[in-house]
């Protein structure tokens, strides 16, 4: 009996460290997830470009980082729009005209959506501004925005190769960026005059004739802004996978790696 008792006690003692070790690993994993979610929600988040609405600034297959602290925090700062902040926005700061931003598109803004989707566009109109497109030209507060023709450019799009007119557009605050136009007669080239409400922003894609933006769904609420696009850390032209390292020169756009977004 004594030998059996000693054996049982030894087994019990040997099991304790194993249980403690497993518990520590679980606690470690928990805190690692908490830290990762905190960084993702409050500081930095990766994002990939699935469409051509921001060509030529951003291409399909670009992977970029956004900073989450620029415009403050709302429920949309968190994964799945969990209502940790149920109303409004903490530490809110307005974006500048010309900022490239990520915002949460919801069915409240675009009823056709069945759920929340992230959009990336450029801030064109600020609260109180009027914005209108007339014959392909952008008007802000009834003044035509200057644009200068750079030339024609042929690139790959979702629909294959396409040729665009490329312009340098100068916004009223002096921000210069490039835009693409098919022509000045497309559906989005003539709109009504929009007045941007308080705490809202008018957002447009740089690929002007191929962008679903505020010309169609109206201004974006401040609370839906998630962050500012900062720099591209990886870019893939779609002709290969990252693990095919021997083919990297074929599909990695090396000239776009670690470039800032303006």
Image: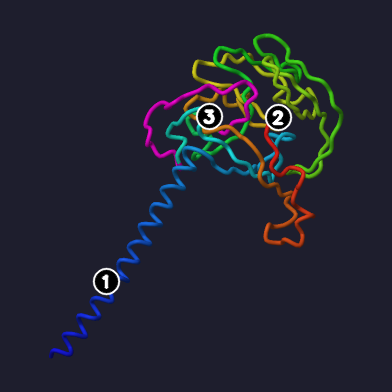
Q: Who comes first in sequence, dot 3 or dot 2?
A: 3
Residue at 81 percent across and 40 percent down: it is: 155
Residue at 59 percent across and 13 percent down: it is: 129
Observer-nearest residue: 84 or 214?
84
**Does 94 lie within the magenta span?**
yes
Residue 41 relative to residue 258: left or right: left
Q: Nearer the viewer, mark 3 or mark 2?
A: 3
In the image, the segment drawn in magenta is 79-102
Q: Position of residue 133 (x, y in %)?
A: 70, 18
Q: Main secondary structure of the magenta part?
A: loop
Judging by the rendered image, the residue that carries numbered circle 3 is: 70
* Residues under numbered marks 3 and 2 in contact, where contact means CB atoms less than 8 Å apart: no
Q: Tell me if residue 21 comes above or below residue 104 in the rendering.
A: below
Residue located farthest toward the right when viewing the structure as drawn: 151
Q: Regarding mark 3 in the picture, which secondary structure is present there?
A: loop
Task: Work out how far the residue at label 3 is from the one at label 2, CA to CA, in angstroms.
Answer: 21 Å
Judging by the rendered image, the residue that carries numbered circle 2 is: 206
Residue at 72 percent across and 28 percent down: it is: 208
Q: Position of residue 157 (x, y in %)?
A: 75, 42
Q: Nearer the viewer, mark 2 or mark 1?
A: 1
Residue 194 relative to residue 208: left or right: left
Q: Regarding mark 1 in the picture, which secondary structure is present there?
A: helix
* Residues under numbered marks 2 and 1 in contact, where contact means CB atoms less than 8 Å apart: no
Q: Who comes first in sequence, dot 1 or dot 3?
A: 1
Residue at 78 percent across and 22 percent down: it is: 184
Q: Regarding mark 2 in the picture, which secondary structure is present there?
A: loop
Q: Position of residue 236 (x, y in %)?
A: 71, 49
Report which quarter residue 174 is drawn in: top right
Residue 101 relative to residue 58: left or right: left
At label 2, counting other C-alpha atoms closer than 10 Å, the crowd grade (few under 14, some 14-19, many 20 or more) is: many
Judging by the rendered image, the residue that carries numbered circle 1 is: 16
């Amino acid at each position: 009996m004594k030998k059996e008792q000693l054996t049982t006690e030894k087994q019990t003692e040997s099991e304790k460290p194993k249980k403690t070790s497993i518990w520590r690993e679980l606690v470690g994993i928990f805190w690692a997830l908490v830290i990762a979610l905190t960084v993702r929600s409050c500081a930095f988040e990766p994002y990939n470009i699935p469409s051509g609405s921001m060509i030529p600034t951003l291409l399909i297959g670009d992977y970029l980082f956004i900073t989450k602290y620029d415009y403050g925090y709302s429920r949309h700062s968190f994964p799945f729009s969990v209502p940790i902040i149920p109303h409004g926005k903490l530490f809110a700061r307005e974006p500048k005209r010309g900022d490239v931003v990520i915002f949460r598109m919801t069915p409240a803004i675009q009823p056709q959506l069945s759920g929340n989707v992230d959009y990336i566009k450029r801030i064109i109109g600020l609260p109180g501004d009027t914005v209108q497109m007339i014959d392909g030209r952008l008007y802000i507060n009834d003044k035509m925005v200057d644009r200068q023709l750079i030339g024609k450019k042929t690139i790959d799009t979702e629909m294959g190769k396409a040729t665009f007119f490329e312009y340098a557009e100068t916004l009223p605050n002096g921000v210069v960026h490039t835009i693409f136009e098919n022509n000045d007669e497309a559906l989005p080239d003539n709109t009504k005059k929009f007045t941007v409400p308080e705490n809202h922003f008018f957002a447009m894609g740089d690929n002007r004739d191929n962008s679903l933006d505020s010309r169609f769904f109206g201004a974006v609420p401040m609370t839906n802004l998630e962050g500012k696009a900062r720099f591209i850390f990886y870019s893939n032209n779609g002709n290969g996978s990252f693990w095919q390292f021997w083919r990297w020169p074929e599909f990695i756009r090396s000239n776009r790696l670690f470039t800032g977004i303006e």
